[in-house]
Amino acid sequence: MNVQPPRRLEPILEDLERARDPADLQDVATRLRDLFHIDHLVYHWVSAAGDQYGCGTYDPAWVARYVEKDYLRIDPVIKGCYQRFHPVDWKRLDWSGKPAQAFLKEALEHGLGNQGYSIPLRGPNGQFALFTVNHRCDDDAWAAFTEAHRRELILCAHTFNQKALEFEPDRAPAPARQLSPREVDALTLLALGYGRAQVADTLSISEHTLRVYIESARFKLSAINTVHAVARAISQGLIVI
């Protein structure tokens, strides 16, 4: 598990943005897991109709078991994150009930770690998703990891979700004046409350370059200022938070 800032994140995210089908997302998930030196990394998507899609590094036997037993109904991570908008450490969720405890015991037997950190994501038409990192370690090591990588993980999560929405069946065509991937990243992080310096640092660009992206997005959205641009991007489904 790596608590140092990952230096090879940007090329992986660029490959994610170029993904042509869901199979490419699986490859990116594996590469991100290895980059962060953790046991597992998973993206789990649920449509408004209850259809599920996922990619990641959990044991396929556990994934099949999860679907077979319809564990979506009792999974404390799903239940606990559905009403939240911010990243959630699994220790803050309710695992007290017998079904939840049995679920956790079985998950650990299938190779999941005792620590988890999930980022809730939402999109048009009731789409809900989770981006999760999972590892086996003690509480102090996990707290250090999540504190060190919170911003990078949020960026990964939203890039994953933006790409996954492109593969959603029957999705409406994108608006004619689509934002560039970097414009989406910048507005998404601003929408999450990051300051400009933090956004520039997270994207590994200068604040001058960030201003160029923001002004370009503002022009495309016919927005009078940055706040207006963020609001318009959210309302038009160009960014999801």
Image (spheres, helix red, strand yellow):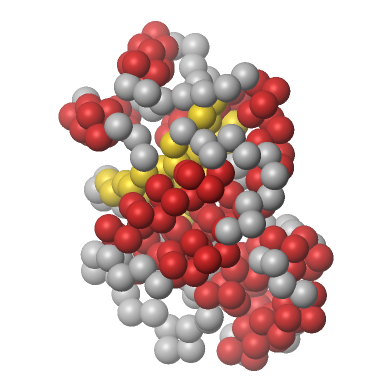
Residue at 59% over, 35% down? 1
Q: Nearer the viewer, residue 221 or 36?
A: 36
Horizontal and vertical percent position of residue 227: 72, 73
Q: Residue furthest top?
A: 98
Q: Nearer the viewer, residue 134 or 233?
A: 134
Q: Nearer the viewer, residue 55 or 173?
A: 55
Quadrant location of residue 115?
top right
Q: Does residue 70 appear anywhere in the picture?
A: no
Residue at 52% over, 36% down? 38
220 is higher (above) or lower (below) than 235: below
Q: Residue furthest left?
A: 68
Horizontal and vertical percent position of residue 174: 39, 79
200 is higher (above) or lower (below) than 176: above
Residue at 66% over, 62% down? 189
216 is higher (above) or lower (below) than 78: below
104 is higher (above) or lower (below) than 163: above
Q: Does residue 113 appear anywhere in the picture?
A: yes
Location of the C terminus by quadrant is: bottom right
Instruction: Please tell me how many numbered marks the rendered image carries.
Output: 0
Quadrant location of residue 138?
top right
Task: Specify whether 139 is left or right of 15.
Answer: right
Horizontal and vertical percent position of residue 112: 41, 25
Horizontal and vertical percent position of residue 51: 25, 48
Residue at 63% over, 52% down? 6
Task: Specify whether 141 is left or right of 164.
Answer: right
